[in-house]
Image: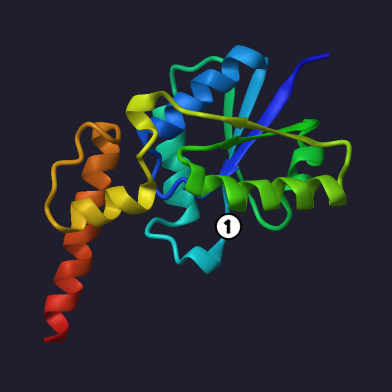
């Protein structure tokens, strides 16, 4: 029986920290399904379609990685994919409380599905998609945080937003 894990998240956008977790998950499983959440509460910068496309490009050379998207409860998606494990990344202690609450809730809803917490390499432990977007919006060089094509996508999206904002004035 193949060991399948699901790594859900918003991936808005994917960072080198996310890629590090995906590679680590591959070491303990046969297949990693990276699942983009349709979480509109977070007001995503990129559409689900854009995030899925960027993820597919970022993991292209990684054997055993599949990219998809889901709406609703992650445990339903995990079951649908034939998996029994959810991978969650923990960067700092600040992530722990939220992730712990989510893992316990998922366990209560589906006690046959386990959550495994993984830490990225120290060099990525401070990275967050939100921080990357904010830094880029102020013109910072984000080259070391995201793949080149993601950096370009962020810059293009920011220039379109700025152009639309300037037209309103």
| Label 1: how many Cα within 10 Å (few below 14, some 14–19, many 20+) | some
Q: Quadrant of the N terminus?
A: top right
Residue depicted at x 59% and y 13%: 27
Residue depicted at x 49% and y 49%: 94
Relative side of 44 to 73, left or right: left
Residue 123: % across, % down: 33, 26
Query: From this viewpoint, which residue is outermost toward the bottom?
Result: 169
Q: Is residue 63 visible?
A: yes
Q: Quadrant of the C terminus?
A: bottom left
Query: From this viewpoint, which residue is outermost toward the front?
Result: 93
54 or 139: nearer the viewer: 139
Task: Say how the picture is coloured.
Answer: rainbow
Relative side of 115 to 64, left or right: right
Residue 143: % across, % down: 19, 35
52 or 113: nearer the viewer: 113
Relative side of 67 to 59, left or right: right
**Which corner quadrant of the image does residue 68 belong to?**
top right
Q: Is 148 above or below relative to 13? A: above
Residue 105: % across, % down: 77, 53
Residue depicted at x 67% and y 17%: 29
Q: Secondary structure at mark 1?
A: loop
Q: What is the count of numbered marks?
A: 1
Residue 112: % across, % down: 88, 36
149 or 11: nearer the viewer: 11
Q: Is residue 76 visible?
A: no
Report the residue marked by disc 1: 38
């Amino acid at each position: 029986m193949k060991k399948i894990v699901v790594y859900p998240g918003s991936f808005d956008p994917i960072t080198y920290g996310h890629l590090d977790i995906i590679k680590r998950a591959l070491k303990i499983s046969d297949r990693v399904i990276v699942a983009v959440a349709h979480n509109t509460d977070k007001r995503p910068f990129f559409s689900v379609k854009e995030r899925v496309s960027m993820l597919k490009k970022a993991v292209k050379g990684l054997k055993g990685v599949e990219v998809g998207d889901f709406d609703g409860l992650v445990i339903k998606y995990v079951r649908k994919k034939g998996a029994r494990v959810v991978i969650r990344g923990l960067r700092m202690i600040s992530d722990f409380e939220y992730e712990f609450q989510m893992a316990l809730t998922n366990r209560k809803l589906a006690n046959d599905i386990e959550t495994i917490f993984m830490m990225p390499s120290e060099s990525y432990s401070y990275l967050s998609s939100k921080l990357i977007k904010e830094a880029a919006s102020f013109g910072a060089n984000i080259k070391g945080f995201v793949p080149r094509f993601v950096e370009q996508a962020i810059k293009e999206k920011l220039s379109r937003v700025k152009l639309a904002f300037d037209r309103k004035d």
